[in-house]
Amino acid sequence: MSEIPLNKFEKHDLVIRLLKEGKTYREICHIAHIAPRDIKLISKKYKQQTRLEQNKKESNNNKSSQIKKLSLSSRAFILFKEGKKIDEAKVLLDISFKLAIRYWKQYLKSIRMYESFEFYQDYQYDIPTLLSINNFMKKNNVYGKDVLNMVRQIQDVISLNKIISNLKEELKQTKNNYSLNQNTMRNPQLPPLGPLPRYYNW
């Protein structure tokens, strides 16, 4: 029964496996049915790939050891710069969540993003409304200064409404006082009589 011939990928894997086992080119030629020239090419590529992987591994190890020598805050900054989240930094650095938050705030300040973070904390539940306002502004070519002027006008209207409300209250009070005075003048009350003299007693 004849053997099923291997395709080029299977031959490539077989040659690498045999090279790892320490087989000679002559032995590999006999087993894999491949020319010595092809074995040499596969061997060369395999060695290059192995070297690259080894260099990468060493570079990562060096980077890791360098990072470990840094302070906790510097290591946290590197993690945040790489896109890690607060809870990931907490776990990787084995620190408390409170400390991770502190490093996160310091990192945001260093890249001038802390105000954005504070804004998000204060207005996170209003963001959908603010985005709607932003979309309206874009569609209607409305600028920030226009919105600011509008807000100032609204504040003026609110102040005017308060003044009007206070004036109405004062006017109402004045009317009530005037009505009370008018009634008092129409029906003057006599002062109460004291005890009668003794000779008026029967």
Image (cartoon, rainbow, N blue to C red):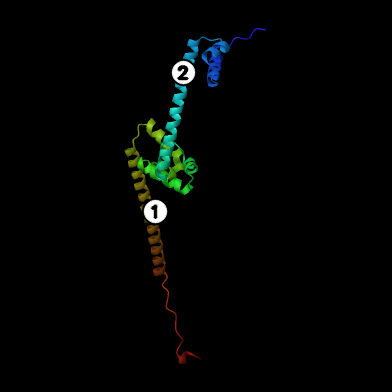
**On the rendered structure, is 129 left or right of 7?**
left
Mark 1 surroundings within 10 Å by alpha-carbon count, few (fewer than 14), some (14 through 19), many (20 or more): few
Give the residue at x 48% y 20%: 46
Give percent across and percent down for residue 163. 36, 53
Give percent across and percent down for residue 194. 44, 84
**Residue that label 2 marks:** 45
Outermost residue on the top side: it is 2
**Image position of 108 with respect to 58: above or below:** below
Q: Quadrant of residue 79?
A: top left
Q: What element carries label 2?
A: helix
Quadrant for the N terminus in the image = top right
**Image position of 41 with respect to 115: above or below:** above
Give the residue at x 54% y 11%: 29
Separation of residues labelled 1 and 2 (CA atoms): 88 Å
Would residue 115 be visible to someone looking at this image?
no
Query: What's the amino acid at mark 2?
Result: Lys
**Image position of 68 with respect to 139: above or below:** below
**On the rendered structure, is 28 left or right of 137?**
right
Give the residue at x 48% y 44%: 90
Give percent across and percent down for residue 36. 50, 11
Would residue 106 be visible to someone looking at this image?
yes
Q: Which mark is residue 21?
A: none
Query: What's the amino acid at mark 1?
Result: Ser
Which of 15 and 153 lies nearest the eye of the viewer? 15
Q: What element carries label 1?
A: helix
Which of 1 and 82 lies nearest the eye of the viewer? 1
**On the rendered structure, is 123 left or right of 110?**
right
Mark 2 surroundings within 10 Å by alpha-carbon count, few (fewer than 14), some (14 through 19), many (20 or more): few
Give the residue at x 45% y 42%: 124
Q: Residue 165 carries which label?
A: 1
